[in-house]
Structures are given as structure tokens and as C-alpha cells.
Amino acid sequence: MKALVTGASSGIGRDMAKYLSRMGCDLILVARDEKGLEKVAESIKTNTKIIATDLTVIDNCKSLYKMVKSEDIDILINNAGFGDFGQFVETDLNKELNMIDLNIKTVHILTKLFLRDMKAKNHGYILNVSSSASFQPGPLMATYYSTKAYVLRLTTAIYEELRKEGSNVVVSVLCPGPVTTNFNNVANVEFQLKSLPSKYVAKYGIDNMFKKKLIIIPSLYMKVLYFFSRILPTKTILKISYNIQKRKGGKK
């Protein structure tokens, strides 16, 4: 099998690539950080190609697909993404627009293009990396939470379309809580909850993808959060979410 992993130079994407390699998959690793990709590729035993490109640029997403279309991709993992912390009126607009491009548009484009090919051959796996942030509104991280909600809703909608058609293509969405990665530094936050190891989340996500699970939540705490987010009134959820977010405080 052959897998394409975005955001593969560090964190969950890196650890997913390593785990897939141990399972015997050949890999195409994509990220902006070419040196980071080279380092990951050096640690992988299976055949590996690296593509350094900025996926916040929409044309680069389309070019990436054209570049690898003939590779017959079996697994697509849309992992690239980032967040930011702060009052909505104060956060940087350009950073937020880049976030929307990467967290939403890139996932949308790559999912659509590769899904068409997978449907044609009636085989393949797509794992979109969302977040527990997708379960509720996120005051003080409004844009990030909104982008991850898009990923969750897009993936679950596609799942039902495929199920109704009897397709063998599998789509799943990974919704972890805090994970030990570089996300905190980019988003300017300090999580109060204990972070899960990136290797654990990567393995958990891929194992459950192969089990054809739709919404993959790696921790009991986040499963409980998901349950209550579906039954509590929106204003109650907003108050709880704001207090949780405020304790993150933003790194100084």
C-alpha cells in the first residue's frame, strides 16, 4: 500500500508516517519543512518520497495532486494544520486566513481529488485530522475551533454518502485533545490538561481507520466531552469552553 501524509515533518504526521512504514506502506511525505521531511525519511525503511510545498497556497494543493496522481495512493492522511489563541478582534487576520486555507481548503481540495480516484477503483482510506475542538464553539480560539468543526462535518457527511452508495472507500476523522507536538508553540497556548503522546495518537488513529471507525477519539476524557457537547445547551457549553480556554492563558 502507498500512503500520502501531509504535515509529515513533525508531530502526529511524522509519527503516523513511521507507524505506516512499520506496517509496510510506501510513503509520500508532504510539508513546508524540507529538512524536517528529510529527517523523517531517513528514519523510515520503506520507499519514501518527500515533497516540500506550502499547502496554504491553493494552487500548490492542486499541483500536489497532479504530481502524485499516477502513484495510485491507497491512503490519504490530511494532517497539516495549525491554531492561534486570542480575542477574535485582536488576533492576526492574515494568520487566520492562512489557517482557513490550510485547515479547511487544503483538506477539502485533497479529499475531493483523491476521493474521486478512490471511488473509481472502489478502494482506499482517507483520514482527516480534526480535533476535540470540533465538538463545541471555542471562544479565544474561535477560528481554529471553527476550522476543525468544518473538517468533522465534511468527513461525516462524505461517510454517509459513501455508505449509501455501498462504496468500499473508508473515510474517518481523528479528533484528539491536547497532544505533545509543536502545536502549542504555533498556537501560543499552554494546555492545562495532560497531553497525550504523539506516537500513541498516531497509532490509535491509524488502527481505528483500518477498523473503519468514523469518529476516532483517542482519550476517555474527550469521549465524555463529546457526549456532553451533544446534550448540553449551547450557552452552557460556551461558558464552560470559555473558562477552559482562558486557563490556557496564551504563552508569554
Image: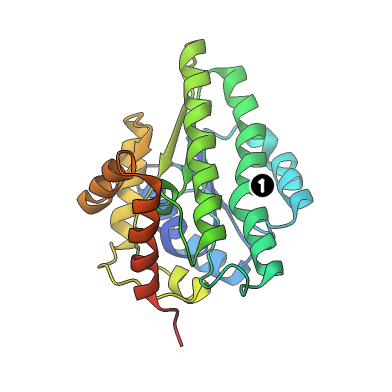
Residue at x 47%, y 65% (from the top left corner): 10
In terms of secondary structure, where does tag 1 sit?
A: helix
**Residue 220 location in percent, x, y?**
20, 49
The colour scheme applied to this rendered structure is rainbow
**Residue 199 location in percent, x, y?**
32, 58
Amino acid at the residue labelled 1: Lys
**Residue 96 location in percent, x, y?**
64, 64
Check the image and report above or below for 130 versus 116.
below
Check the image and report above or below for 125 versus 27.
above
Q: Is residue 111 left or right of residue 227?
A: right
Residue at x 59%, y 71% (from the top left corner): 35
The single residue placed furthest to the left in the displayed view is 220
Which quadrant of the view contains residue 251? Answer: bottom left
Residue at x 35%, y 48% (from the top left corner): 22
Instruction: Please rate how many residues cluster around mark 1, counting C-alpha atoms within 10 Å: few if below 14, some from 14 to 19, many from 20.
Output: many
Q: Nearer the viewer, residue 83 or 174?
A: 83
Total marks drawn? 1
For disc 1, the marked residue is: 105
Q: Nearer the viewer, residue 177 or 24?
A: 177
Q: Nearer the viewer, residue 158 or 4?
A: 158
**Residue 139 location in percent, x, y?**
47, 62
